[in-house]
Amino acid sequence: MSAEAVGRHMPAIITLDDLAAMISADTHGRRYETSPEGVLSVVPPPDSEHAVIATRLMAWLIAAGWPLEQIMQVAGVRIPGPDGDGGRIPDLTVWSRPQPRAVWLAVADLVLVIEIVSRGSEAIDQGAKVSEYAAAGIPQYWTVARDPAQTVTLYQLGPDGTTYEVTAKMPLAWLLQTAPADHIGS
C-alpha cells in the first residue's frame, strides 16, 4: 500500500482504540505507539538480542521474589497528557500490585518501566519517553542500551515529581549481580 493510500485512510486523531486495532491487524509484529500529543511511532519487531535481554531481566526479578502477577512484558500503558492520552508499550513493566485485565493500563500502580533500546528507537526511548514517563509520574524508568556493555541507565523522579534524574549507569551484567530491591522502590 502506498503512503498516499495510508494517509487517505488515517484518522485525524488516533485514539487508543485505533492503536489497538492497528496492532491487532498487523501481521508483521510491529508495535504502534502514540505520544500524548498524538505522534505515531511504528517500531519493528524486536530481534533475538532484545528478547534475551528482556528474559534476563525478568528472570532476575522473578529469582528475587518479585510476584509474577506484577511483572509484565509488552503491556499497553496509558500515558496521560493535556490534549489526550498516549499509548506506550514498554518492554517490561513492574507494578506495585496485580493489574486488571485491560489493553491500556493506567500508570497509578506502575513502579518501573524498562525499555530495551532498539536500533531506530534511540530518540524515542532516550528522549521522548524520558519526559513522557516522568510527566506521567512513573517513579522509575530504565533504558538498556545495545552497546557492548548493554549499559543500563536508571532514572528516578526528582523532587519536583515531573522530571527524572539519572541515578546510575552500569553494565547489565553488573546490575544482574545485585538485588532488585537495591534499585526498585515499591
Image (spheres, grey):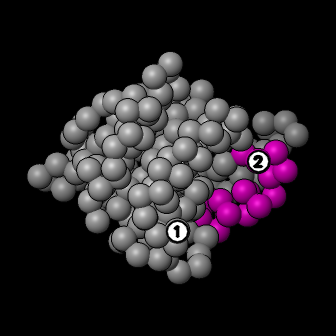
Magenta region includes residue 140: no
The residue positioned 52% from the left and 72% from the top of the image is 69
Q: Residues within 10 Å of mark 1 (few under 14, many from 20)?
A: few
- Magenta residues? 14-30
Magenta region includes residue 24: yes
In the rendered image, the quadrant that contains the N terminus is: top right
Rendered location of residue 128, percent (x, y)? 41, 40
Q: Depth check: 94 or 36 in front?
A: 94
The residue that label 2 is drawn on is: 29
> Is 61 situated left or right of 182 in this image?
right
Amino acid type at image mark 2: Gly
Q: Residues within 10 Å of mark 2 (few under 14, many from 20)?
A: few
Helix, strand or loop at label 2? It is: loop
Vertical side of 3 occupied by 97: above or below: below
Vertical side of 99 occupied by 45: above or below: above
Rendered location of residue 53, percent (x, y)? 56, 39
Camera-nearest label, 2 or 1: 1
Helix, strand or loop at label 1? It is: helix
The residue positioned 47% from the left and 57% from the top of the image is 63
Amino acid type at image mark 1: Leu
Vertical side of 109 occupied by 48: above or below: above
Q: Depth check: 147 or 124 in front?
A: 147
Q: Depth check: 16 or 111 in front?
A: 111
In the rendered image, the quadrant that contains the C terminus is: bottom left
The residue positioned 30% from the left and 31% from the top of the image is 169
The residue that label 1 is drawn on is: 68
